[in-house]
Image (tube, rainbow, N blue to C red):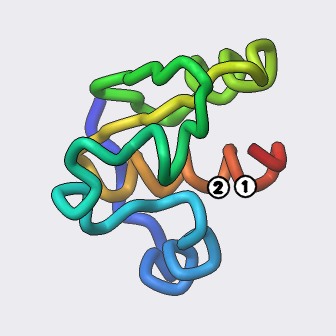
Amino acid sequence: MRMRKKKNAEARMQACSETQILNPEEYKGKWDECFAKGRTLCLEIGCGKGTFVVESAKRNPDKFFVAVEVIRDVILLAMEKAKNEGI
């Protein structure tokens, strides 16, 4: 099923901007020192609405999770979920 366009998406993305990395190429080879800080780095490609990655992050605080999604309206939901959970 196709995701409907989210209202106020730009403002909602800005509200969750601390959970988003817009320039990942700048961190090439530096993810551990900049973000993970010694924790195991876990990557989820195609995170959807973020349920799995957010629950995994809550259950594994010793790991650093990165979620990737190409559909903007979908990643918005994942970002809001992570922010609301304090992750």
- The kind of residue tagged 2 is Glu
Say what secondary structure mark 2 lies in. helix
How far is the residue under mark 1 from the one under mark 2? 5 Å
Residue type marked 1: Lys
Q: Which residue is mark 2?
A: 80
**Residue 83: mark:** 1
The structure residue drawn at horizontal position 40% and vertical position 46%, both measured from the top left corner, is 74
- Return the residue nearer the eye: 76 or 27: 27
The answer to whether residue 17 is left or right of residue 47 is right
Q: Position of residue 10 (x, y in %)?
A: 43, 82
How far across and how far down the image is residue 5, in percent?
A: 35, 63
Give the quarter of the figure containing the N terminus. top left
Mark 1 lies on a secondary structure that is helix
Q: Is residue 1 left or right of residue 58?
A: left
Is 30 or 56 nearer to us in this picture? 30
The residue shown at (26%, 56%) is 24
| Residue 53, image x, y percentages | 57, 24
Which quarter shows the C terminus? top right
Q: Are marks 1 and 2 in contact (CB under 8 Å)?
A: yes
Residue at 45%, 75% in the rendered image: 9
- Seen in the image, is 29 located left or right of residue 42? left
Which residue sits at x=58%, y=18%? 52
Position of 49 relative to 9 (above/below): above
Residue 38: image x %, image y %?
59, 29
Q: Which mark is residue 36?
A: none
Dot 1: within a 10 Å radius of its alpha carbon, few (fewer than 14), some, or many (20 or more) residues? Answer: some
